[in-house]
């Protein structure tokens, strides 16, 4: 009725003799002074709409001033004026924009619109803002509409599209117009067409607009639902709803009395004990729930207690009624189109999430492979359990940091740091092999303890030199940001660079092992050191070079890892466990096995983290347990090495 009254009022206002002429904002306000002074959301709407449609160039300024409490009425002559505080009074401006002097506060009635009226004014101002010459104003209007859209925004938004000179804003307006159409347009066909126009789109704003269309509420009915009810599905008590939930819906709908609680039941029975009986039943017999329910039913029939449902009655009432999940949107065509589009979006989102998870797993696998490739060489060829391998990674990262302190150009510093880190860690590896490892061959326990002690010593040395705080190893600017495919799938450029570096090392390693004399000798020593020695190969020299090569590769891996991880003395310990797992799971001494192991561990870890994102420690634990079980099935890894490893 209020909407009808407002429409009649607007029609009368527009058909009045005053409206037949070109009305100014002052004319409209003067003609409706009583409504303006006592404005409310229910009555002032037609006046605001008439002001906005008047064509007066000052209309937007007047409406804006009104919303900001900058509109007043001079008591002496009843004139509407724009007011602003000035000393002890107001500075006045006529509605046509001319100066009107000043006035004391006692002579001005300041109009103070409530929140509802300000909302109507803001809606009316949209049509001015959407066509404002200032692009930033038009953009701000679009942002405001997108944040808090209403049906009133649809018409001015549509009207502003043909005259929009900016191609980007025009596209934004057209998209926003379709989003508002699917929500607010009274024409069902237009809403369905707007929904179907978004086929293939996965935008967050689209999903936010569609979700309210398929939102449901649960209702209980005694027979057929009311006409026009848009039913999503029928719910079954005991399956889709508990009996308590179903009965609560019946009570809320006025279809059943309130549930009788155990406390109320006992209180009612105790209050109606007469001569040791309750409704003719001896108190001693009220020792079961069923007997107490029967006694209450008898009291209820006698009118001595209020009507209430027992457990059995609640179950029977729930079974006798229908429970429906009903769409809030009454139009079935709209909900069907919205649900179909959301189902399509969910399928695409699942696909995109799987792709993003695969990229994350591949990225993590490349990091593990890069960290483990050096260990694969030393462990595979020499069968030395080098617990200090992580510290070679740490040494490489600190080498990159030192180079950046000398060479401020990040790109040049990284190009210098990579070979320098290889040289530093190669020399450290050779020294370690010559001084310690060579004396402990075929003594794995002593080797493990010795290298573990060396790792602790190297960590402490790094703390003494660089301190305990993390040091920055800054990536070049061209590695900033990420390659983003959509709002779900993306990967940072640093991760891409590490992936490429891992592929480069794989290629270099294969070339070294297959095409060079050193590679031939390494393979010979790996397969059968005794036979290799009889062919003139020095296994002792090959072991030294192999250990140095594996350590040097770990140094390069440290530079790459340091670009995205914190560079501290504990950097290597974060990767040593994964490096050993990668080598063991893939197959000792086989580069392809290490690659397969890195992919398996990276995928497994990311998969477990996706299933349990709140607990990464649990993901690590589950991954280790899985690998232990895997090794029980394939003790030599995914790709077992033939030759000496097979014999061992």
Image (tube, rainbow, N blue to C red):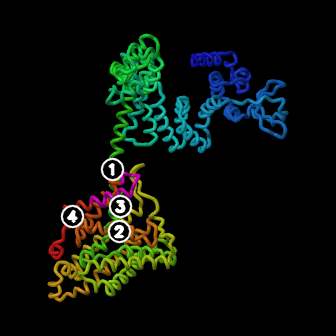
Residue 385 relative to residue 219: left or right:
left
Of the numbered discs 1 and 4, the one sitting upstream in the chain is 1
Is any part of residue 359 visible from this angle? no
Of the numbered discs 3 and 2, the one sitting upstream in the chain is 3
Task: Write down the residue under mark 3.
Answer: 363
Q: Secondary structure at mark 4?
A: loop
Which residue does the image show at 43% across and 31% down from the upper left? 213
Name the mark on residue 638.
4
Q: CA distance from mark 2 to mark 1?
A: 24 Å
Q: Are marks 3 and 4 in contact (CB under 8 Å)?
A: no
Q: Are marks 1 and 4 in contact (CB under 8 Å)?
A: no
Q: Are marks 2 and 1 in contact (CB under 8 Å)?
A: no
Quadrant holding the C terminus: bottom left
Q: CA distance from mark 3 to mark 2?
A: 11 Å
Where residue 123 appears, as percent x and y from the top left, is: 60, 32
Where residue 108 appears, as percent x and y from the top left, is: 81, 30
Q: Secondary structure at mark 3?
A: helix
- For the residue pair 202 and 363, the one nearer the viewer reads as 363
Where residue 334 appears, as percent x and y from the top left, is: 40, 28
Q: Are marks 1 and 3 in contact (CB under 8 Å)?
A: no
Task: Write down the residue under mark 1.
Answer: 354
Range drawn in magenta: 609-626
Which residue does the image show at 44% across and 14% down from the upper left? 275
Of the numbered discs 2 and 1, the one sitting upstream in the chain is 1
Of the numbered discs 3 and 4, the one sitting upstream in the chain is 3
- For the residue pair 645 and 111, the one nearer the viewer reads as 645
Q: Which is closer to the viewer, label 1 or label 4?
A: 4
Q: Which is closer to the viewer, label 2 or label 4?
A: 4
Q: Residues within 10 Å of mark 2 (few under 14, many from 20)?
A: some
Task: Write down the residue under mark 2.
Answer: 501
């Amino acid at each position: 009725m209020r909407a009808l009254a407002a429409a009649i009022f607007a029609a009368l206002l527009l058909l009045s003799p005053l409206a037949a002429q070109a009305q100014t904002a002052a004319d409209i306000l003067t003609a409706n002074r009583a409504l303006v002074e006592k404005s409310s959301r229910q009555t002032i709407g037609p006046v605001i709409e008439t002001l906005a449609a008047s064509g007066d160039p000052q209309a937007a300024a007047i409406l804006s001033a009104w919303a900001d409490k900058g509109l007043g009425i001079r008591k002496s002559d009843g004139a509407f004026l724009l007011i602003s505080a000035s000393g002890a009074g107001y500075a006045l401006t006529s509605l046509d924009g001319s100066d009107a002097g000043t006035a004391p506060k006692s002579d001005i009635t300041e109009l103070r619109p409530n929140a509802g009226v300000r909302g109507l004014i803001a809606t009316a101002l949209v049509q001015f803002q959407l066509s404002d010459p200032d692009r930033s104003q038009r953009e701000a209007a679009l942002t405001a509409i997108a944040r808090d859209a209403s049906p009133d925004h649809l018409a001015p938004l549509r009207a502003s599209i043909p005259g929009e000179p900016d191609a980007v804003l025009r596209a934004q307006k057209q998209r926003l117009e379709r989003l508002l159409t699917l929500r607010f347009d009274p024409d069902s066909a237009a809403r369905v067409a707007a929904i179907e126009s978004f086929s293939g789109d996965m935008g967050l704003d689209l999903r936010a607009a569609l979700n309210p269309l398929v939102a449901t509420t649960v209702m209980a009915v005694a027979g057929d639902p009311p006409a026009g009810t848009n039913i999503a599905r029928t719910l079954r008590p005991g399956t889709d709803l508990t009996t308590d939930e179903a009965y609560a819906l019946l009570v809320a709908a006025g279809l059943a009395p309130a549930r009788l609680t155990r406390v109320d039941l006992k209180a009612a029975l105790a209050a109606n004990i007469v001569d040791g009986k309750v409704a003719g039943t001896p108190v001693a017999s009220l020792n079961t729930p069923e007997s107490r329910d029967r006694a209450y039913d008898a009291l209820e029939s006698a009118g001595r207690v209020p009507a209430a449902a027992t457990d059995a009655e609640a179950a029977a009432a729930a079974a006798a009624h229908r429970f429906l999940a009903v769409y809030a949107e009454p139009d079935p065509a709209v909900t069907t189109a919205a649900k179909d589009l959301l189902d399509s979006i969910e399928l695409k989102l699942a696909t995109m999430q799987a792709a993003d998870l695969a990229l994350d797993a591949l990225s993590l696998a490349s990091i593990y492979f890069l960290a483990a490739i050096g260990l694969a060489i030393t462990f595979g060829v020499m069968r030395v359990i080098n617990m200090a391998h992580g510290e070679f990674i740490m040494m490489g990262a600190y080498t990159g940091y030192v180079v950046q302190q000398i060479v401020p150009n990040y790109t040049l510093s990284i190009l210098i740091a990579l070979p320098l880190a290889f040289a530093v860690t190669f020399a450290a590896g050779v020294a370690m092999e010559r001084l310690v490892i060579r004396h402990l061959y075929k003594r794995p326990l002593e080797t493990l303890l010795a290298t573990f002690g060396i790792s602790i010593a190297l960590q402490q040395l790094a703390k003494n030199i660089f301190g305990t705080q993390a040091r920055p190893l800054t990536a070049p600017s061209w590695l900033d940001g990420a390659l983003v495919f959509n709002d779900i799938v993306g990967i940072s450029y640093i991760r891409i660079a590490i992936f490429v570096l891992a592929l480069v090392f794989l290629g270099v390693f294969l070339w070294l092992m297959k095409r060079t004399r050193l590679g031939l000798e390494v393979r010979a020593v790996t397969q059968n050191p005794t036979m290799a020695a009889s062919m003139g190969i020095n296994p002792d020299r090959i072991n030294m070079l192999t250990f140095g090569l594996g350590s040097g590769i770990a140094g390069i891996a440290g530079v790459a890892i340091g670009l995205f991880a914190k560079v501290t003395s504990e950097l290597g310990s974060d990767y040593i466990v994964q490096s050993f797992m990668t080598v063991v799971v893939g197959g000792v001494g086989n580069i392809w096995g290490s690659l397969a192991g890195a992919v398996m561990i990276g995928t497994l870890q990311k998969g477990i983290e996706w299933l349990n994102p709140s607990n990464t420690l649990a993901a690590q634990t589950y991954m280790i347990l899985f690998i232990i079980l895997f090794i029980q099935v394939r003790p030599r890894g995914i790709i077992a090495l033939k030759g000496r490893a097979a014999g061992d």
